[in-house]
Image (cartoon, grey):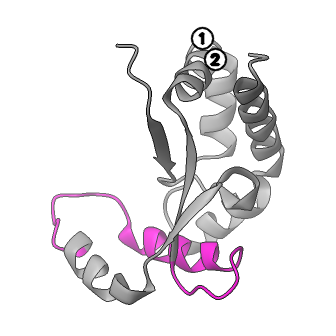
Amino acid sequence: TGYECQIRAFEVQTPMTSMIFNSFYEISFFTETKKQLLLSYKSQTLEFANIFLSWTINSYFIKNTRNVEVFLTISSKSYVKLVEKYIHNAEDIRYISEKFYSSGSSAKILLTYLKGNSIRKRIKKDIIEVEKGII
């Protein structure tokens, strides 16, 4: 549409870690309320325990926090360029989904945090290039 705004991409079963996220929100003050609200959606198949775990893991990247939701905040123009880059490259999509997506046990989530550094570096490079207008 040509409308420009800021996009906040939220991690969903794909840990960002501090390499990718550039903004966060401390949710410690209402963590329990948020947990209860999420758990009220009985039809969802998503493992909410993984979301709860990510809130805690994310807090290790940011001093003086206990539970944190992290985001990649980026202009809509840059976000569209990133999405187009990955949509038009099936190999990138396959690589990301095989190496970087996590679901299931807490152990699997922790492993995804550890094993995804190569793809995070690649995504970070792409974010920098798109924001500089190289891509």
Q: Amino acid at mark 2?
A: Lys
Q: Quadrant of the N terminus?
A: top left
Tell me which residue sits at (81%, 51%) in the image. Answer: 117
Classify 75 as above or below 58: above
Q: Toward which corner of the image does residue 2 lie, by quadrant?
A: top left
- Compared with 77, 27 (above or below) is below
**Residue at 80% in and 36% down:** 122
| Residue 128 vertical position relative to residue 132 in the rendered view, above or below | below
What span is colored magenta in the figure? 39-67
Query: Mark 2: few, some, or many residues within 10 Å (few <14, many ≥20)?
Result: some
Q: Which residue is mark 2?
A: 85
Residue 95 position within the rendered picture, expressed as x and y whole percent measured from the top left: 69, 31
Circle 1 — which element? loop
Whole-angstrom CA distance, mark 2 to mark 1, is 6 Å
User: Which label was assigned to residue 88?
Assistant: 1
Circle 1 packing at 10 Å, graded few (<14), some (14-19), many (20+), is few
What residue sits 25% from the left and 70% below the top? 38
